[in-house]
């Protein structure tokens, strides 16, 4: 497995551990349908979290810079597809995780719960 894939899996595990410690039940990891993908799906108390995890080994790089308008649109399309496909009737929430560091060194983790609202489609 390529180094960036190993780093990404490690970062996702840190995010999963954090969500579990906060009482969330992990429903899916790396859910895919076609070209749509969600890193982590968790639920608690009628809320379903769709989480994006960005991990960087360079501590001077802001992982949140990779969460662009296009990425947000992709996440919301994926969440809508997931909810429709599973007939889930929970309130959706979009969380972001930024992890800087490496598994064999120090790291920081930043979690932004309810980071954004799903953009409305305009016709």
Image (cartoon, rainbow, N blue to C red):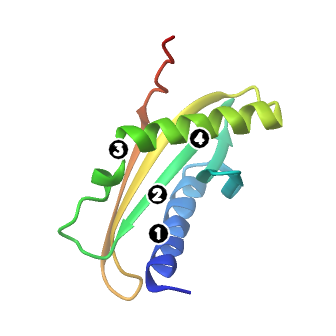
Q: Nearer the viewer, mark 3 or mark 2?
A: 3
Disc 4 vs disc 3: Cβ atoms closer than 8 Å? no
Q: Nearer the viewer, mark 2 or mark 4?
A: 2
Q: Which residue is mark 3?
A: 68
**Crowd around label 2: few <14 · some 14–19 · many ≥20 (10 Å):** many
Q: Which residue is mark 2?
A: 53
Check disc 1 and report its element: helix, strand or loop: helix
Residue under the point 53% across and 41% down: 75
x and y percentages locating residue 10 in the rendered image: 50, 75
Alpha carbon separation for disc pair 1 and 4 = 17 Å
Q: Which tag, 2 or 1, sits closer to the chain's start?
A: 1
Check disc 4 and report its element: helix, strand or loop: strand
Asked if residue 49 is positioned above or below residue 29 in the image, the reply reads above
Residue under the point 52% across and 41% down: 74
x and y percentages locating residue 67 in the rendered image: 36, 48
Residue nearer the viewer, 69 or 114: 69
Alpha carbon separation for disc pair 2 and 1 = 7 Å
Alpha carbon separation for disc pair 2 and 4 = 12 Å
Q: Nearer the viewer, mark 4 or mark 3?
A: 3
Q: Nearer the viewer, mark 3 or mark 1?
A: 3
Asked if residue 14 is positioned above or below residue 112 in the image, the reply reads below
Q: Which residue is mark 1?
A: 11
Q: Which tag, 1 or 4, sits closer to the chain's start?
A: 1
Disc 2 vs disc 1: Cβ atoms closer than 8 Å? yes
Q: Which residue is mark 4?
A: 49
**Crowd around label 1: few <14 · some 14–19 · many ≥20 (10 Å):** many
Position of the N terminus, as image quadrant, is: bottom right
User: Quarter of the image holding residue 101?
Assistant: bottom left
x and y percentages locating residue 71 in the rendered image: 44, 44
Q: Which tag, 4 or 3, sits closer to the chain's start?
A: 4
């Amino acid at each position: 497995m390529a180094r960036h894939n190993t780093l990404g899996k490690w970062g996702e595990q840190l995010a999963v551990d954090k969500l579990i410690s906060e009482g969330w039940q992990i429903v899916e990891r790396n859910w895919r349908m076609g070209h749509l993908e969600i890193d982590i799906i968790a639920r608690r108390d009628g809320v379903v979290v769709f989480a994006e995890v960005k991990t960087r080994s360079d501590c001077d790089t802001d992982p949140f810079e990779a969460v662009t308008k296009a990425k947000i649109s992709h996440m919301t399309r994926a969440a809508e597809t997931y909810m429709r496909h599973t007939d889930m009737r929970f309130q959706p929430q979009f969380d972001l995780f930024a992890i800087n560091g490496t598994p064999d060194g120090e790291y920081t983790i930043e979690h932004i719960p309810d980071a954004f609202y799903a953009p409305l489609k305009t016709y």
